[in-house]
Image (spheres, rainbow, N blue to C red):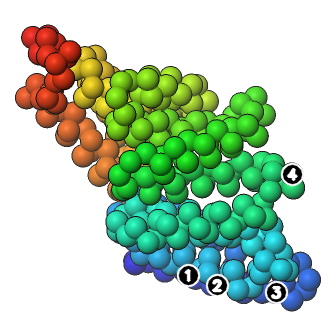
Amino acid sequence: MGHGADQLGQRAHAARRAGRRNNAAGGGHCRVSCSAERKNSGAGQRETGTARLEEAVGVFREALKENTRERVPLDWAKTQTGLGNTLRALGERDSEAARLKDAVVAIRQALEETTRERTPLDWARTQTSLGNALRTVGARESGTAWLEEAVAAYRRALAEQPRDRAPLDWAFTETNLGAALVMLGEREKGTARLEEAVATLHEALKERTREDTPFLWAQTQEKLALAHFAFFDKSFEPNHRDDALSAIDGTLEEYSKAKAVFYIERAAHLREKILTARERQVYPAPSPTQAGRRDEKP
């Protein structure tokens, strides 16, 4: 895994020991170990390999043995959510459907303890995590059922994430809602979902600014590029193709600064598709009502 990953593993091991000392002393919390788990998981999500994510899964599972549901239900729920988020990231990379569905199960279980009445903000964040897991499954499955569930989870989260009180949480959920709407828009007739996706992502960008949160801005820009490119596939309107290219160019600039290899490769692949569409003037097969648009110049 390399020296950096070894250091992360050592910190995670030290955190587990600290967590055990806290529990033995009656503290019963996972603040230290959860911090180490997030470092492993967060670093792994920017890399193309899965070593750090696999390590994070192991740390989460160990933490669950110590921070049991019976003893510390809210800490157990947070760890379950972290496990689910990491399983989702792993499943996104290795295409294992079982991991993705395990992620959904883990987060649903977390919601049994992280209730809206007890901890509304944590409940909202967990709903967003559930939406992300459902959306990732939905990307691999046919139909729209999983994606519709994801949209519902995001909307539930937004009900407890008012923009004026939690702007970055709100923008995170808005960004992921936009991504789910893009996927639905690609599968459904018409452009209503794509129009909503574009509007949703533009609103998120008002909080996720390039100046204040450049990496988060880039993540939202990437989804905006997907929305515009999906719009182009349906409408053949070259302005959407050009807007997609502009969005992905900015995205790549920030991903490159962050040296986020996994994200760079994904965004570069999308950029190549957009350039191919522009240079070859590639259009999908038009429907009878759209056939007349073939003569339009890009």
Numbered disc 2: secondary structure: helix
Which tag, 1 or 4, sits closer to the chain's start?
A: 1
Q: Amino acid at mark 2?
A: Glu
3 or 2: tag closer to the N-terminus: 3
Q: CA distance from mark 4 to mark 2?
A: 29 Å
Q: Is residue 130 visible?
A: yes
Along the viewing direction, whichever of 165 and 255 lies nearer the viewer: 165
Disc number at residue 117? 4
Q: Nearer the viewer, residue 214 or 93?
A: 93
The residue that label 2 is drawn on is 62
Q: What residue is rendered at 83% in x and 54% in y? A: 119
What residue is pinned by disc 3?
Answer: 21
Under circle 1, the secondary element is helix
How much space separates mark 3 and mark 2, taking CA atoms? 14 Å
Quick one: SS at disc 4? loop
Q: At which x and y percent is residue 275?
A: 17, 32
Q: CA distance from mark 3 to mark 1?
A: 19 Å
Label 3 element class: helix
Residue 268 is left or right of residue 292, and the answer is right
Q: Which residue corresponds to the image point at 74% horizontal and 85% vertical from the top-left?
A: 66
From the top left corner, tell me how far across and down residue 187 is, in percent: 35, 38
Mark 3 touching mark 4, by CB under 8 A?
Answer: no
Which of the pair 253/199 is nearer the observer? 199
Tell me whether circle 2 and circle 1 mark residues in contact (CB < 8 Å): yes
Q: Nearer the viewer, mark 3 or mark 2?
A: 2
Give, as a three-letter code, the residue at label 4.
Answer: Glu
Between residues 71 and 290, which one lies in front from this camera angle? Answer: 290
What is the crowding at mark 2: few (fewer than 14 residues within 10 Å), some, or many (at least 20)? some
Residue 183: quadrant of the picture: top left
Is residue 192 shown above or below 227?
A: above
Which quadrant of the rendered structure holds the N terminus?
bottom left
